[in-house]
Each structure stands twice: as structure tokens, then as C-alpha cells.
Amino acid sequence: MEDYGLIEVDLKEIFLALRKRIWVIILIGILAVLSTGIVNIFFLDEIYSSSTTLIVSKQASGGDSREMQLSDVNLARNLVDTYSVIIKSNRVLEKVISTLNLNVGIGTLKSNINVRSEGNTEIIRITVEDTIPERAKDIADTLAIVFIDEVKTLLKMDNVQVIDTAKASHTPIRPNVKKNITMALIVGNMVGIGIVLLIELLDNTIKTPEQVQQYLKLPVIGMIPNIGSDKVKR
């Protein structure tokens, strides 16, 4: 038993459908680009970053300080990991907020700070993100100073020095307007193509004599011409 309700769409029909409704794809692409551009330019804050780097030296100064065997790679790595936690501790961040008189909570400040070690080295990089370049720089530098003081106080060690102080960068790291607009155009066009194909798949009407023969397997006996509305009125 033949199923006449099932209509297959070949590649030629898909191409013709896309060409017929190309305006839908273009319109959705334009709307996606415009909306993304407006949001990125007028509604999203520009974010800047600033970094300072520290080095953990091989020996701790002071006669009563614990000697650190940094020749042991595992011990050195654990020490750097410990320092990374101390840098983002509430104790350190509270002093940074107080020193710079920041109007921000500890949780928010912590989320804007990234601390990582450079591979298996003794280098620690502190990166701060903020909407103001100079403030990002000040936070990074102050964070390094406060952290070094806390290491001396808590661990009785003086084995951390600043390699590079932070610099204010006036090039935002995000939003990446060009990248976001390009992605919006691609996604918009894909959505437009999907909508056109969905319309075509849901449209099961027969429009041409060829479709009658193809889908219904019936011969075409005759065709009724399309009479204009002005002739019908007469």
C-alpha cells in the first residue's frame, strides 16, 4: 500500500525553497547582527585586565624560618598552590578592599581575580579584571603587596618577590564585538535556513503538474489557467 501522505523533498526542491525565501534568511541574519551589535556596544561593560607576576625564592630568610627544600619539585608545587589560595583568601581581599577603599564585596572581587602558576616554575601570575583599567592595575599591585606581607605574618617567611608590576591596559579583553557579530550572523543565517526548511516541510500542498505525477502517481489530464481577479469580476 502506497503512502501518498509522505512527501519527500529532494535537494533541488530544498535549493528552490531557500532561493524563494532568501529574504527570510537575510532578514533574520540582519536582525541578529543588529541586536548583537546594540547589546555589545551599548549594554555590555568593557572589561580590562592587568597582571602582576611573583616569584617564590628558593630559600626563606630568617633564622627561625622553616627551610624550604625547593629542589623537591612536589614540595615547591605544593607551596605555590598554598600561596595561590592565600592570595584569594578573605583575609587578604579584605585588606585590599580597605586599602583601596573599594565599593565592592569580597565575593565579587574574588570572582574578578585569577591566580595561576606558570607551569612547573616558581612563578605566580595574578590577573585582575575590572571595568576601569587603572583600577585593575591598582588591585593587582596592592594584592601582591598585601599577600607578601601576609606570608611574612602567617608563615614567618620572606621568600616572595615581585617580578613585574601591573600595567594598565586600555584594550578591553571583552566583549569581542567583531567576534560576537560574526557568530550572530552565522547563527542568524542558520536559524533562517532552519525556518525556511521547516516551512517547506510543513507545506504539503501540490503546486505543479510534475508534483501530481511524482507524489500521487496520477496522469495530468488538463490544467486550469490562473484567471486574474479583474476578469473574474466581469
Image (cartoon, rainbow, N blue to C red):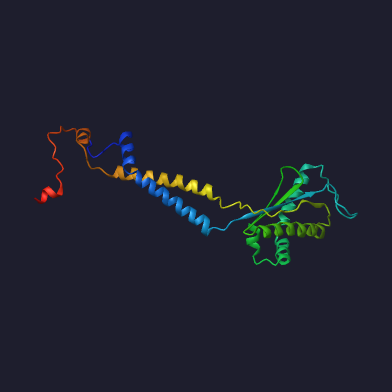
Report x, y in % for residue 138. Answer: 71, 59
Q: Is residue 165 above or below residue 226?
A: below
**Would residue 44 be visible to someone looking at this image?**
yes
The residue under the point 29% across, 45% down is: 202
The residue under the point 38% across, 45% down is: 25
Tell me if 19 is positioned left or right of 40 in this view: left
Tell me if 93 is positioned left or right of 226 in this view: right
Q: Is residue 98 above or below residue 55?
A: below
Q: Is residue 23 above or below residue 94?
A: above
Name the image quarter holding residue 112.
bottom right
Report x, y in % for residue 163. Answer: 78, 50
The residue under the point 82% across, 48% down is: 57
For the N terminus, which image quadrant? top left
Which is nearer the eye, 124 or 83? 124
**Would residue 1 be visible to someone looking at this image?**
no
Report x, y in % for residue 162. Answer: 78, 52
Report x, y in % for residue 105. Answer: 64, 65
